[in-house]
Image (cartoon, helix red, strand yellow):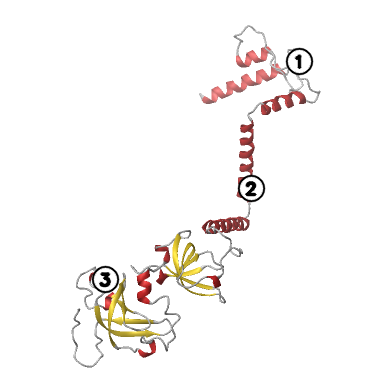
Amino acid sequence: MAATALVLLLLVAGRLQAEAFNPSTRQPRPVSRRGYAPTDDSLDSLFGPRVDDGEDVVLFADDDAGGESGDWGAPSTEAKKRGGMSRWESLNPKIKARIVKEAQERAIRNKKRREPAADKKRRLYSQYREMEKQSKREKYVQRATPIGSKSRTLLADISPGETLPGKVISLTRFGAYVDIGSEVDGLLHVSQITRDEFVDHPRRFLTPGDDVEVRVVRLDPQLKKLQLTMLPEEVLAEENVLNKHDESAEEDDRIQLDEIEADDELWGEIRRVTDYGAYVELGSVVRGFLHFMDHPLFGEVKGAHPREYMRVGDRVRVWVLDVDGTQKRIKLTANRPSGLPGPRREIQWI
């Protein structure tokens, strides 16, 4: 059946082609500039009889094009310019600006998509460096008086012991630099911030830009150095902070570090307790540090804070574990070393 239908279709197509190209039966037909124009009979034979009134509606004519002979069917240059520009000119200026901006961004994106990997890496690294510089600039604290200004106070006009207002400029792991209006910034060491707890980093208590009140400990106009403190008056008097730098080794009646050896037995008083242990006053030039694990009561209460069994004012008997003359530190233990001769005795707390 399929073969029979295919043969019939080929016969009908051949007959139509013969009628279309037979000079005796073909009627003269108008030929347009774009090529062959089919007749009504051929159209009826292909698509069936017309169902309308038979009148053709001309959508576009050659005479209405208004163009030259070679621009058939194309609008004139003047009409094209008038139609395109009139629509663009009628747009809102904000919409025009947005369209232009989106086109520029799209062009930039396409350019970046086509750029080589080396150029892209170089561009991104440059952007990262710029962002890093901007972040550093934002961290800088604005000074009331610029550095180098003649209105700043000279170090020679400042005396040790003066209390002055200041502003924290920057932080380091060993302290903070404070601007007190002098020709140089003063150093506030971590040991001079507070005695309430151990200060591992000044950022726990200070932030760049904070207004603080400090006291001058010592200064050197020739070396342009200035040392500050935030400790209370009673602590300064107790530890002799303001005067200990002026005393020589001959005038100081305290025990010098070269007179202390390992395993020496000493008595002292706890002056400050931190999260890691206690500082013990031994009568030496520096205080000894007693770690909480070297205390005999460590471990009796699991998870207990050192303040629970080490209190300020307690007198303790300690032994020297190590003396560091360079760092000026004395490491202590409240447990009697096993290598010492003689009977072992328990420590009695008074």
Disc 3: CA contacts within 10 A as few (<14), some (14-19) or many (>=20) = many
Q: Mark 3 vs mark 2: which is more N-terminal?
A: 2
Q: Amino acid at mark 3?
A: Pro
264 in relation to 160, above or below? below
76 in relation to 250, above or below? above
Q: Tag on residue 111?
A: 2
Q: Is residue 67 left or right of residue 162?
A: right
Q: Is residue 42 left or right of residue 182?
A: right
Q: Is residue 36 left or right of residue 251?
A: right
Q: Which residue is mark 1?
A: 30
Residue at coordinates 48% horizontally, 70% vertically from top-left? 187
Q: Secondary structure at mark 2?
A: helix
Whole-number angstrom distance, CA of label 1 to CA of label 2? 53 Å
- In the rendered image, residue 331, in percent from the top left (x then y), is placed at 33, 81
Residue at coordinates 26% horizontally, 70% vertically from top-left? 307
Residue at the farthest right position? 69
182 in relation to 138, above or below? below
Whole-number angstrom distance, CA of label 1 to CA of label 3? 113 Å
Taking depth in this image into account, of 260 and 315 the one nearest to the observer is 315
Quadrant of the image for the C terminus?
bottom left
- In the rendered image, residue 123, in percent from the top left (x then y), is placed at 61, 55
Q: Secondary structure at mark 3?
A: helix
Q: Tag on residue 306?
A: 3
Nearer the camera: disc 1 or disc 3: 3
Q: Amino acid at mark 2?
A: Lys
Q: Mark 1 vs mark 2: which is more N-terminal?
A: 1
Taking depth in this image into account, of 257 and 107 the one nearest to the observer is 257
Q: Secondary structure at mark 1?
A: loop
- In the rendered image, residue 211, in percent from the top left (x then y), is placed at 46, 59
